[in-house]
């Protein structure tokens, strides 16, 4: 596996260039590959109006991502670091007794040990991670991080002559060995731009169609800010009420459990009205105005330093 110079490419995504530079600074050599994996979210059946899609729960990949830079090793060790936790790196064995990993690395470490036990990437890796959104935004980060790390390490060793790992096999390995949200993992691994993926499994995709006869619906991730009366639960309740009054059609949790964020589904032509109504309601009460982050359904995880050929089929 040859080293990549993504850090020096002026046309590359700045956050991925930073990740590649951080890898070289930490380990003293360039990464062999850089991957990006999307955050993913749930869209339950009640958030998709009848006639727009079959009545089932859905997941999709968001247009925000985590990044992973990797280089393979041959000594069975995982050296891992994170741009989000620069003073909290670790060196961990992939076989034999498990070591104690930093909290941020626990899930990627468990995923890579599961792969090593199945014969993939047993030689280890140097790994540098970066989550581009703060935890407070509320999109689940564990699943994209573990999928990105697993894809990166497995392919790094496949290019060294190891066993290739199909994404369907990876999904099965993670589901069996690492507790987590399997539906979100499937979105990270198999999503398509502008498409919903059935949460219950199977290959079924469906277009994210309009709520009315207009364009694709607008998705807004609303995150409450704590402060005074505006504790997260109270803030979310107020924000959802005002958003619905301004034209939002549905509200749901982006993960399986309630959190500090809620996903709003609205007609595209009501986006500005929803933002204005929420901001005005909080300003009147002298409460911190919630963050509103635009979300679009995007593609599955991919290797970034060597984009796929246009004719290459979608991941399966």
Image (spheres, grey):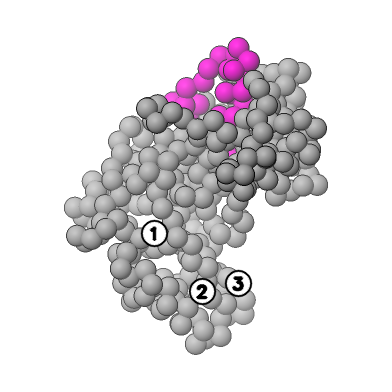
Pointer 3 with pointer 1, Cβ within 8 A? no
Could you tell whether 141 is left or right of 197 in the image? right
Name of the residue lying farthest toward the bottom: 284
Q: Which residue is mark 1?
A: 219
Image quadrant assignment for residue 153: top right
Q: Is residue 158 magenta?
A: yes
Of the numbered discs 2 and 3, the one sitting upstream in the chain is 3
Mark 3: secondary structure: loop
Question: Which of pointers 3 and 1 indicates the residue nearer the eye?
Answer: 1
Mark in front: 2 vs 3: 3
Q: Using the image, determine if residue 95 lies above or below residue 241.
A: above
**Residue ID at (49%, 58%):** 258
On-image quarter of the N terminus: top right
Residue located beneath label 3 in the image: 226
Query: Label 1, label 2: how many angstroms apart (C-alpha)?
Result: 21 Å
Tell me the residue at 48%/62% (across/down): 293
Mark 2 and mark 3: Cα distance apart in space: 9 Å
Instruction: Give the magenta range.
Output: 145-171
């Amino acid at each position: 596996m040859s080293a990549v110079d993504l850090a020096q490419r002026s046309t590359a995504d700045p956050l991925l260039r930073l990740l590649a530079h951080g890898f070289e600074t930490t380990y003293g050599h360039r990464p062999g590959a850089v991957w990006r994996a999307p955050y993913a979210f749930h869209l339950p059946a009640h958030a998709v109006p009848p006639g727009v899609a079959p009545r089932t729960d859905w997941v999709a990949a968001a247009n925000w991502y985590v990044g992973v830079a990797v280089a393979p090793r041959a000594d069975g060790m995982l050296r891992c670091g994170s741009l989000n936790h620069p003073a909290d790196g670790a060196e961990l064995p992939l076989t034999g007794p498990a070591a104690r990993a930093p909290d941020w690395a626990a899930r990627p470490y468990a995923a890579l040990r599961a792969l090593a036990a199945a014969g993939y990437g047993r030689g280890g890796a140097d790994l540098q991670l970066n989550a581009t959104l703060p935890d407070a935004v509320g999109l689940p980060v564990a699943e994209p991080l573990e999928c990105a790390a697993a894809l990166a390490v497995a392919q790094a060793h496949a290019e060294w002559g190891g066993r290739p790992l199909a994404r369907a096999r990876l999904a099965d390995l993670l589901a069996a060995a690492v507790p987590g949200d399997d539906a979100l993992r499937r979105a990270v691994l198999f999503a398509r731009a502008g498409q919903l993926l059935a949460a219950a499994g199977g290959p079924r995709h469906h277009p994210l169609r309009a709520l009315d006869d207009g364009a694709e619906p607008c998705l807004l991730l609303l995150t409450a800010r704590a402060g005074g009366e505006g504790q997260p639960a109270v803030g979310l309740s107020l924000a959802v009420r005002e958003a619905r009054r301004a034209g939002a059609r549905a509200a749901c949790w982006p993960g399986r459990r309630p959190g500090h964020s809620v996903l709003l589904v609205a007609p595209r032509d009501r986006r500005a009205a929803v933002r204005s109504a929420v901001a005005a309601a909080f300003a009147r009460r002298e409460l911190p105005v919630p963050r509103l982050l635009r979300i679009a359904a995007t593609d599955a995880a991919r290797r970034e330093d060597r984009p796929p050929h246009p004719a290459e089929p979608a991941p399966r």
